[in-house]
Amino acid sequence: MTAIAPSILAADFSRLGDLVREVDRAGADRIHIDVMDGHFVPNLSMGSVVVKGLRPVTQKSLEVHLMVQDPGKFLEGFLTAGADRVIFHLEVEPDPRPLISRIHQAGKKAGLAFNPDKPVDEIAPFLGLVDLALCMTVFPGFGGQAFISSSIDRVRQLRELIKTHNPTCDLEVDGGIDAVTAPGVVAAGANVLVAGTAIFGAKDGPTAAVKHLADLAAHAAKSWA
Ligand SMILES: O=C(CO)[C@@H](O)[C@H](O)COP(=O)(O)O
Ligand SMILES: [Fe+2]
């Protein structure tokens, strides 16, 4: 089954709790929380207080996508606040093993992300150690960007590597995922879809958008399952 991970970056922050409850009820699998430091990416977003605030709001897992230069510095803060899964970038941790261990020692899941210009096979040595590989389908830093179409081939390549190195590892995609792009990435092998604008900016509202993406993904998954 394909998991839907709404990215709260696109949510109306004055109604954050209610919107998270809504996507939870609509069937979202996990809540994606984008953390930006103004260094690794040219934007600032939110910190561990947001995780702490959302922890009592949903039983679904809270996943933190750290787009920061020094993820190790902030790790404990997010874990203490209630994060279930912490994803950081290979670009800033060329040897990600110590951080992966720290996350696992805390009993949480570890994810490794990489940008659209990183050769996919550079993640291969670490696939056996992580619970999730995040293939960015835009350059990180902002919501609402257009999906980079060459990502489809990269997802296909990553799926092959995951089959070889760690078949239970999640393959997540993030950036420009919507009703148009979701079927292609799922057919290529993604099993977790992050979507911000397509869910929280949807004309018909977040509930309909989560269900629609899940339906499209279920249909597309049949083509490779
Ligand atoms: O990590 C990021 C952006 O850097 C994402 O999680 C975005 O928040 C996704 O937003 P949309 O492209 O779905 O609007
Ligand atoms: Fe993200």
Image (cartoon, grey):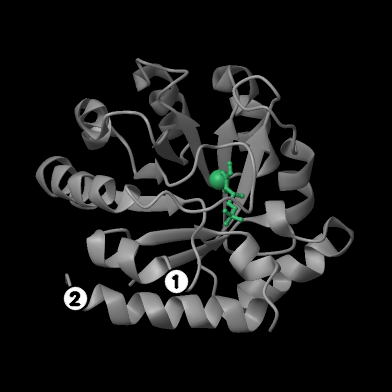
Position of residue 38 in the picture relative to residue 189 (left or right): right
The residue nearer to you, when weighing 69 against 18, is: 69
First in sequence, mark 2 or 1: give its number. Answer: 1
Residue at the farthest right position: 14
Which residue is identified by label 2? 223
Q: Which percent across, then down, holds residue 83?
A: 60, 44
CB within 8 Å, label 2 to label 1: no
The percent coordinates of residue 210 (x first, y second) are: 56, 76
Quarter holding the N terminus is bottom left
| Along the viewing direction, whichever of 190 and 87 lies nearer the viewer | 190
In the picture of the structure, the residue carrying the numbered disc 1 is 180
Q: Residue at x 59, y 22 (%)?
A: 40
Residue 158 visible in the displayed image: yes
* Quadrant of picture, ligand 2: top right
Residue type at tag 2: Ser
The type of residue carrying mark 1 is: Val
- Can residue 55 be seen here? The reply is no
- Classify mark 1: helix, strand or loop: loop
Residue 95 marker:
none
Q: Please name whichever residue, 101 or 26, is drawn nearer the observer in this view of the structure.
A: 26
The kind of secondary structure element at disc 2 is loop
Work out whether residue 219 or residue 176 is closer to the camera in this orientation and state it: 176
Ligand 1 is within 8 Å of the C-beta of the residue at disc 2 = no
- The quadrant of the rendering that contains the C terminus is bottom left
Identify the residue at horizontal 57%, vertical 33% (top origin). Answer: 66
Q: Name the residue located 39 percent from the left edge and 52 percent from the top edge.
A: 172
- Residue ID at (50%, 82%): 212
